[in-house]
Amino acid sequence: MGKRSHRRRWLAAISLGVLGLLLAAECYCRFHLGLGDPPLSITDAQIEYLFAPSQHLRRFGNHVDYNAWSMRSDDFPVQKGQSNELRVMVFGDSVVNGGALTDQHDLATSILQRQLGVALGRPVVVGNISAGSWGPPNMLAYARRFGLFQADAVVIVVSSHDYADAPTFQPIVGVNPDFPSHRPWCATWEAITRYLPRYVPMLAGKTPPVRPPTQKDIDESLGALGDLIRLAQQNGAKVVLAQHLTLAELPPGRLEEGHDAIAKTARDAGVEPFDLEGTGASAALYRDHIHTNQAGQAFIAARLLPAIREALAATK
């Protein structure tokens, strides 16, 4: 009996210790990292996918908010509230979106809204219409579905690879851990399934092969880009097209395939494109090979501000 009693006490102590570690891990992941309540995505027959509307979260110490129109922006009505209100709609992918590692206040679009308001002395609304891995066809489908919200200016931010970024409509929401459709059952589980594989290669599994772009992908993406520009113009908005460079494209690097094709498409539609990362850009602005950090978001805002003001001035 003595040995059995000792074994039971030993197993009970181990069980309590494991339970304590799990509870500590859950508290750390949930209350310190903000896991367990990720931004949710929804599937759409035309757009492919977008963020679920009206979400207000805190992740990694950052505020992450989506308005009623699935924009990473403050809520605003469809119609302008004042006759002198300025509206700028910014379309893009994860670079414009900023992700959970960027606080709402530090997004380029949030900075633009504040700076334009001060510079112009009038009410300003800047919409952040974006989602990870969106290409021009996704952006165009969103604009056709929801409209342009009486935009005075439409800003389109694309990278070289977007020249062939056509949607596949393969299941992604609720399948890819980066596009959850519901909350995980606990924060620790989200950390293990979504984030740990990024830092422990043996857990990541096989990376699917990169599908080479087809001419159909190129035609669809560039066609959608031209259509989005023309749609904005037909609605009376001035268009700004900015090409976001990857880290490898920064001078003295080499521009990737697709850069010139995007520029030509913009010029054919009457818009002169420009590279966001012009003079003064450096690796210090990047979080990885393409996404920007907080300083990079501020840099993007600083580059877009004069381009937007110049485009608006051209309407006079």
Image (cartoon, grey):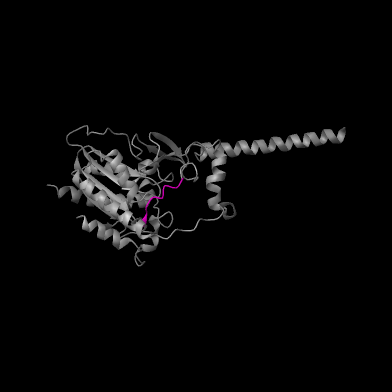
4 vs 305, left or right, is right
Q: Residue at x 38, y 55 (%)?
A: 285
Q: Which residues are magenta?
A: 164-171
171 vs 149, left or right, is right
Q: Residue at x 61, y 35 (%)?
A: 23
From the image, which quarter does the N terminus lie in?
top right
Main SS of residues in magenta: loop
Image coordinates for residue 84, horizontal then vertical, percent: 17, 36
Q: Is residue 73 above or below residue 307?
A: above
186 vs 120, left or right, is right
Residue 189 visible in image: yes
How many numbered marks have been drawn onto this rendered protein structure? 0
Q: Is residue 57 above or below residue 271?
A: above
Instruction: Determine the image quadrant of residue 126.
Output: top left
Residue 243 visible in image: no
The residue closer to the viewer here, 231 or 105, is 231
The residue closer to the viewer here, 284 or 5, is 5
Image coordinates for residue 80, horizontal then vertical, percent: 22, 34
Residue lying furthest front: 216
Image coordinates for residue 252, horizontal then vertical, percent: 35, 67
Image coordinates for residue 141, horizontal then vertical, percent: 32, 44
Residue lying furthest right: 1
Asked if residue 125 lies in the magenta stretch, the reply is: no
